[in-house]
Image (spheres, helix red, strand yellow):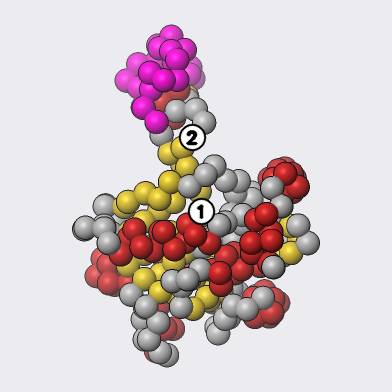
Amino acid sequence: MSKVVALIPARSGSKGVPNKNIRILGGQPLLAWSIAACLKSSVIDRVIVSTDSHEYAELAKKYGAEAPFIRPAEISGDRSTDYDFINHALNWLADEEGEPEYIVHIRPTTPLRDPKFLDEAVSAFATAHNATALRSVHEMPESAYKTFEIAHGGQLKRLGATDTALDSANNARQQFPNTYQANGYVDVLSTAFIRKNGLIHGDHVIPLITPLVVEVDTEDDFLHLEYQLNQAPDIYKKLFN
């Protein structure tokens, strides 16, 4: 039985960027970047790709991951949840070699990873008291408390404010709390917690703070990532050499 299993979801059918998960970035398919980071980790025992595509499954195997099942179409749509594919994978593992203690959830849409952060994430979660999960975040360049929503009357209001006065939003950023954004770099999940509660994160999620990273949602994101690779090519060497 493997103690730590990396699970990489890679469904087909992306609408914003067609075939996003296998789009070429820096000469390699997007999916390959996540596989490579997991294979370089010193604590991950198995790397499994959960996909609804036979093409993606073969690509995953080519780059060293396992793709031992094809995810059913009914849990591979736009509205399918992370719990759906994680629960499906756990059920498969339970029927085969047994469930792992930890699932390391790796999203291929955050491709530029240093494997050391994966090791740090597993270690931090394994030694944390009462943690229900770990999620990676980076500090937002601008505090969320300086952002806006639209009130029922159609006017702007500060996010979470009880009134629509905006002048305090102009205060220096140092006067606002730091806020953090989940970034898909790495989540660490407890199989025991998932099985007991039917949830993947729960109410005591500890953070792993990473450098600011780009998640792929649009064509512009790919251009930004290509620029980052040109500026810092060492990450390619670290993963693929």
Q: Whole-Å distance between the Cαs marked 1 and 2? A: 14 Å
**Quick check: 141 above or below 20?**
above
Residue 28 lies left or right of residue 214; in this view the side is right
Task: Label 2, secondary structure: give it.
Answer: loop
Q: Main secondary structure of the magenta part?
A: loop
Q: Residue at x 69, y 59 (%)?
A: 236
SS assignment at label 1: strand
Q: Is residue 167 magenta?
A: yes
The residue range painted magenta reads 152-178
Residue 136 place in picture, x, y as percent = 44, 51
Counting residues from the N terminus, which is met first, the one under dot 1 or under dot 2? Answer: 2
Q: Nearer the viewer, residue 197 or 142?
A: 142
Does residue 21 appear to the left or right of 86 in the view shown?
right
Q: Position of residue 58 (x, y in %)?
A: 68, 80
Q: Residues within 10 Å of mark 2 (few under 14, many from 20)?
A: few
For the question of whether residue 12 can be seen, the reply is no
> Which kind of residue does numbered mark 2 sit on?
Met
Q: Residue extending furthest top?
A: 167
State the mark number for residue 207: none
Q: Residue at x 59, y 61 (%)?
A: 108
Image coordinates for residue 207, horizontal then vertical, percent? 37, 49
Residue hosting label 2: 140
Question: Which residue is farthest left?
Answer: 130
Assess disc 1: are there few (<14), some (14-19) or many (≥20) residues with their C-alpha within 10 Å of its C-alpha.
many
Where residue 69 sits, quadrant-wise, is bottom right
Residue 208 visible in this rendered orientation of the protein? yes
Looking at numbered disc 1 in the image, what kind of residue is underneath it? Gly
Quadrant assignment for the N terminus: bottom left
Q: Which mark is residue 184?
A: 1
Quarter the C terminus occupies:
bottom right
